[in-house]
Image (spheres, grey):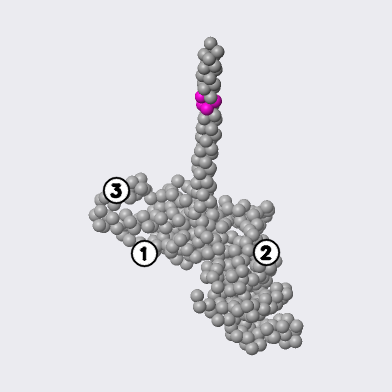
Amino acid sequence: GGGGGGGGGGGTGDGGGDRTGTVVGAVVGGVGGAIAACCCMCIILALLLLLLLKGRRHDSNGFLGVPPDYDEVIYTTYLAPLYRVKNKKQHVLDELEALLVEDRDFIIANAIATAKGMTNDDIPKSLVYVYHDHSMDTDLLKLFIREEIARIDPRGGTMFRSNSVTPRLFKHFALLFAIEFLWESLAPFVWEIQNNALLNEEIEMSHNDGNDEEMGSIKKRTGSQARIGSQVRTGMEIDPSKMDEASDSKVNTLQLWLTAQKIFTSIVRSADSMPAELRDVLCYVHDHVADIHPGEEYKALGAFLFLRFFCPGLSAPRYYGLLEEDPVPTALRQLILLAKVLQNLANDTLPGQKEAYMARLNDFIINNQDDLRNYFRKVLHADHLPSIQRDIPSVVKENALVCLYNTLVTDRDAIDKELFKGLARDDPLYERLDKLLKKGAPFPASQG
């Protein structure tokens, strides 16, 4: 009996061990399952985050919103060493930088830019980069704005339209502070115009080749041969000398009007997203023009912001990072027409006065004038706008300093002529500059 009890006890012990193993297995399995589920969830979240970082979908027409590498758009070739700078010559660049920064009146910068900046775009670009690194780029730009306003009568229609140093400085200033803002405002439209033009070319080629299979594939992707996009449809040419027989000038005019209206509306709605640094410059333009040429301030703002910022983004979208490649000819022509319409709006000029075929767009200008002025008023009185922080890469600043130093050395006579308008030969600033440049030689170009 005792043995039987012992055997029974042993049996009970084995059953308890089985149950314990089952419980432990369940717990371990549950934990393992939870870990696996967490891992899957982490992977899914990581993929979603990657998609968000890569870009976002702005609409249902396929624009994924993948922005460019902004540093590559802003600095281009300056991101790689352009010159050979030996360590023992680094002090030359350091001394030049110190001179430029201590020159609070920008006399040296003004002399370099005035003498060579209108023929060499690297000069204003380099000045913006060097002074941006010391938070002096806005003051530099304002100096040139003052001089341009004093020099030009805006009633003559030339405010900020000449190929002077001021618009060049502003171009690179705006790239530093507002390239993301420009992309947000214009990229969806530029992308769709390019995409539609490419698709039209594909349709035309397939149609001419009689490729029914390819045509079926295109229709499947777009819904039908006629529907190519809801934001922008092709066919905006209104110049009779450039239209083909199948084009309808009235339809094209309406399409050009519609697309220009959508882009203008996007710009107007972006007022609260404008970088504070860009608004600061626009306020300065407005106030300075209002003091000297009252009543012309809105035209000056239009010339400054549209002619030198929004419209170049449309007509040169690759340069401004709105496209990865140059627009195809049809898209480029459409973008140029759109830029022309918006510039006429900003200038308060009826397009039909210069080109008869543009007269159909006169009402677009008239109908949007109040909205444009309200947009400018909103920008001028906006507060809590985003401020952009961007550090200049060291290689970019070195390239900029070498560019300025080489210009000072190779064009000494022309620059001295400008310098002596604001400095005497015995001025300590000039004496230091003269000592720095004496027997100086340009830095050689990099072999790479």
Asked whether residue 159 is drawn in magenta, I would say no
| Residue wearing tag 2 | 284
Q: Is the residue 7 above or below the residue 365 in the image?
A: above
On the image, the x and y values in percent for residue 290 come to 68, 64
Asked whether residue 20 is drawn in magenta, I would say yes
Disc 2 is placed on an element classified as helix
Q: Which residue is drawn at 63% across and 86% down?
A: 440
Asked whether the beta carbons under mark 3 and mark 1 sit within 8 Å of each other, the answer is no
- State the extent of the magenta-drawn residues as a range: 18-22
Dot label at residue 216: 3
Mark 2–mark 1 distance (CA, rounded to whole Å)? 42 Å
Q: Which residue is drawn at 27% across and 55% down?
A: 207
Q: Which amino acid does label 3 sit on?
A: Gly
Towards the viewer: 151 or 54: 54
Disc 1 is placed on an element classified as helix
Which of pointers 2 and 1 lies earlier in the amino acid sequence?
1
Question: Nearer the viewer's eye, disc 2 or disc 1?
Answer: 2
